[in-house]
Structures are given as structure tokens and as C-alpha cells.
Amino acid sequence: MRKIIYLMLTGAFIFLTTFCSEKSDAPNEQVEQRKTTPIDSIRLSDPFILADAKSQTYYMTGTGGKLWKSKDLANWEGPFDVAKTDSTSWMGPKPMIWAAELHEYQNKYYYFATFTNRAVKIDTVAGNIIERRASHVLVSDKPDGPYVPMKDSTYLSADKPTLDGTFWIDKDDKPYMIYCYEWLQNLDGTIEKIELKTDLSGSIDEGELLFRASDSPWSREKDEDGNDKPNKVTDGPFLFQTKTGKLGMLWTSWIYDKYVQGVAYSESGTLDGPWIQEPEPITPDNFGHGMMFKSFDGKNLMALHSHKSINGRFHRVPHLFEVDLSGDKLVVIEPFIP
């Protein structure tokens, strides 16, 4: 019955949005710390959940630079500040923090996130002033931080706005950051990869194109004359592998005013692709920026946020869906209510 009510409520949303990849949560705003908060009472964009086997604790982060902790996925303690940036770096004293992720690797924990220094302007394209924004990596010995900078101050080009960096070890056993090169500058958003140093303390060489927003058959928008065309936004890449070994990537864009979750699969089984886009999105309208993890009782779950606009402000809340990865392709089963 709870799942039926959930579907009725989500189906009743009225979503009014603009074609914009800006994240909605205010950066580093002071939020009262609470305990035993239900997941559907947390306002959070781009939720990412690390199921830490050592502590038997779930750690959730996302846009805004905060961290939440839970033992059961239903009730969460937080929010906590965990990102410690260098005020003398390109990020400045109070960077915006978007789409943070937590990854365990070689007995350490890494904080992949997008940082924006609004005081630095790097370009103006089609009337849009582009701020200094890039994906970056911090490190900690513990899943709940604090996460601090490493050796390299820059991972990606200073003259390109990049965002939503995620982590993958490819078949060559090398670590990579997969990220978006933002449509605000290139006008057709891309998803790219860059090799990382073995300790993730910096990047190697230059980024390489994986695919463009316009490659998708399902993402759509209207041009200035009202003509139909592919949408320009790439958002929230996340890599996964099915039980049969198929390499897939979640990513998000728009169908006109609907925010939707798509998926692509690599024909080669590596990051180099070619990447074949699925013909249709995989979730209901106005759900996106998904990632996947396995619960402590063995369920494959996808975390993502719902999206609606209230009085011109984005309202985004974490949600969970149960998924099936047993075949060649990801199958979304139903909403999961912890």
C-alpha cells in the first residue's frame, strides 16, 4: 500500500522547469543538525550513497557539501560538514559544492565533487557568463571525513567548466574520472574521461570525449524558432556493470521541461565505447542524477532525486528505486521504501 501511495503522489507532481543544468541547493548554507530524519524529509540534489561495509553504515552526500549517516536507509543523522577546501586555491574561500560522491579505494575514501568559485569568470558564451567550475577530488582516512585536498591543485582545464565527476576503474586497471563538460560553453554538453594518478592525487594527460548530449535519441528541446532538436544538457554520469559484464552509464538530461534519467552501454565493455544510447529514459518523469549501490541485505538500489519547481525554486528530494542487474541491461523494478 505504501508503494501505491508513493506512486500516486509522484504522479501528481506539476513540474515547471527551465533548460538549465544549475544545481538548486544553496552552497554551504547553515543547516540545523537533526537526528532520525526520514529520507523523504531531506532536501538534497544529486544524492550519492556509500554503503560502507566496515562500519555497516550508509553515508549520503550530494550538492551542498553536507553528509548524512544512516543504519537502515530510512532514518538519517545530520547534516555534517566534511569537505575542507584550501581557501588559497582556485576554489576561493567559500566555493559552491555540487554533486559530491564518496568512493572507497585502496583503503582510503575519496570525495569527488564539483567546486565553483563565483568570483572568477572564465568566459562569456551566448550571453552567459561562465564561472570557474571544475570537478576535483579530496581524500580522507574515514568515510565521514574530514576530506582534505591532495597534491595537485587542478585536475581539469581551468578554461573549461566541468562538473559531476565520478570514478571508475577500467579494464586496463587504471583509475579514471568521468565528468561532464558543460553545455554553457560548448553548447552541446559532453561526457568525457581523464586518467587519474594511481593514488588519485591528480590527473594524467587531457580529457577524452565519450559522447555528446545530442547523441541521445530521447533528450529533446525547442530552438528559438520552436523547432525540435536534441537537448544540450549532460548531467550526472555514473558507471556500473551488470552481472553479465555489460558496462553501462547512467546520465541525465531533459525531454522539454521534464528531467529524466537515461542510460547508455559500451559496445567494447570499456570507457572508450562506442556508447550506444537506449531509446527511452528508464525512470518516471522528473527523476534524475542517479547512482547505484548494494544494500547490506543484498538489494541493488538506485538513489536519485525528484525534481519540481515551487515558486520558481527547485525542490529536490532523495528517492530510492530497486533495480535488477542480473541480465545484460539495467531494469528498474519499483520505488523502494525503506
Image (cartoon, rainbow, N blue to C red):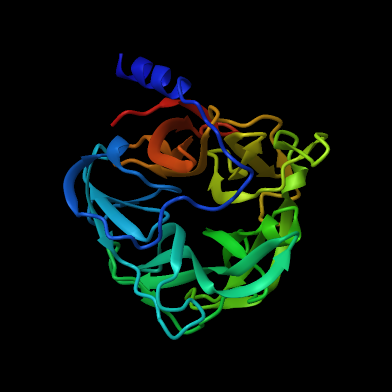
> Is any atom of residue 264 visible in this view?
yes
Give the answer, above or below, for where 232 lies relative to 99.
above
Give the answer, above or below, for where 101 lies relative to 305.
below
Corner quadrant of residue 88: bottom left
* In the image: residue 61, left or right of residue 213: left
* In the image: residue 142, left or right of residue 117: left
Quadrant showing the C terminus: top left
Q: In the image, residue 322 lies at what x, y percent?
A: 42, 30
* In the image: residue 333, left or right of residue 246: left
Q: In the image, residue 212 lies at what x, y percent?
A: 74, 51
- Of residues 201 and 153, the one nearer the viewer is 153
* In the image: residue 66, left or right of residue 260: left
Q: What residue appears at the point 53 percent right and 27 percent down from the top-left corner?
A: 284
Give the mark count. 0
- Of residues 331 and 336, the one nearer the viewer is 336
Corner quadrant of residue 270: bottom right
Q: Residue furthest front?
A: 311
Q: In the image, residue 125 lies at what x, y percent?
A: 74, 63
Q: What residue appears at the point 45 percent right and 48 percent down from the top-left corner?
A: 46
Give the answer, above or below, for where 102 lies relative to 312.
below
> Is any atom of residue 297 visible in this view?
no
- Of residues 275 and 96, the one nearer the viewer is 96
Q: In the image, residue 1 lies at what x, y percent?
A: 30, 13
Q: What residue appears at the point 47 percent right and 63 percent down from the top-left corner?
A: 113
Q: What residue appears at the point 42 percent right and 40 percent down from the top-left corner?
A: 315
Q: Residue furthest left?
A: 35
